[in-house]
Image (cartoon, rainbow, N blue to C red):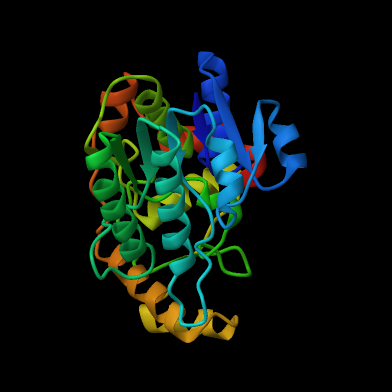
Amino acid sequence: MILVTGATGSIGSHLVRQLTKLGAPFTALVRDADKGRALGCRYAVGDFDDPDSIAAALAGADRLLLNGAGATPVPDGIPQPMVAQQKTVIDAAIRAGVRKIVKVSVWHAQPGGRLAQGAHWEIEQHLKTACEPADVAWSLLHPSGFMQNFFTGAGTFSTDGSLIAPATDAPVSYVDCADIAACAAVLLTQSRGAGETFVLTGPEALTMAEVAKHLADTIGKPVDIVGLGPDEMAARLKGQGVPHGFADDIAFLWAEVGTGNLAATTSTVEDLTGRAPRGFGTFLAANRAAIQ
């Protein structure tokens, strides 16, 4: 049986539907029973900050999708709660007899990296170190930017609906969360990918100008672009009450995207699932109502 954490999120909700379609036995971990019932599947109520609830949810599970929980920064801006939470879940999973852990991480996770980059790298090292003596298989998913981010507008749109970008000509290989979930489903239901890291991207890298054109075609009106440098982004976030250290780190990562560090594309989605990843235009067409 598979335990799916982050089951109501952008990736987990897709994975729940895909595992249901496959007929694979699984339990969705949720923090709220009402949201669990809404999923229409077997669920367990638990919280990463409550080790007993995690242990109970893991009973009978032999595979784990590790995703989600609190990346909310503490006052100095470092998302340490996520590090402690996910380490706790990893240890609990190994004690419970889980034989494979698939972790959703971030592309460019690295030691000393800002925010999620550094936090996920630390969790990855703990995962590898804890799994090896217990002979537990692990796999890492490193996705590019989520197409779903254009639903929320968080950090993407100005108040007047214009796109904001560190550079209009810096491409990003956005990936659909449904494709991330499909890759996770393969790794969780098949004997593949042990000890491997998978970089997941869409089929193309789009500049913000190209994204704006796709959006304009979808909603039937022009979409403007506002260039925002790292200093301006930091000031914007601080003005919204974001802690200064956290704002500065976000601005640093924002500038890195402007250099094209999310521009590469991989064949990983097709290699794992046997089908090409969904392109951005197709994604927008399928989600026209949400985008509008």
Residue 181 vertical placement versus 25 (above, below): below
Give 217 or 134, whichever is nearer the viewer: 134
**Residue 80 location, x and y as percent?**
44, 68
Q: Is residue 242 left or right of residue 176?
A: right
Identity of the residue drawn at 34% across and 19% down: 190
Residue 269 vertical placement versus 6 (above, below): above
Does residue 58 show up? yes
Identity of the residue drawn at 57% across and 69% down: 158
Q: Is residue 111 left or right of residue 92?
A: left
Identity of the residue drawn at 52% across and 83% down: 243
**Residue 25 location, x and y as percent?**
54, 19
Does residue 176 show up? no
Identity of the residue drawn at 66% across and 25% down: 41
**Residue 77 location, x and y as percent?**
46, 77
Q: Residue furthest top?
A: 23
**Residue 90 location, x and y as percent?**
40, 47
Q: Residue furthest right?
A: 34
Residue 39 vertical placement versus 94 (above, below): above
Q: Quadrant of residue 287?
A: top right
Q: How many marks?
A: 0
Give 247 or 19, whichever is nearer the viewer: 19
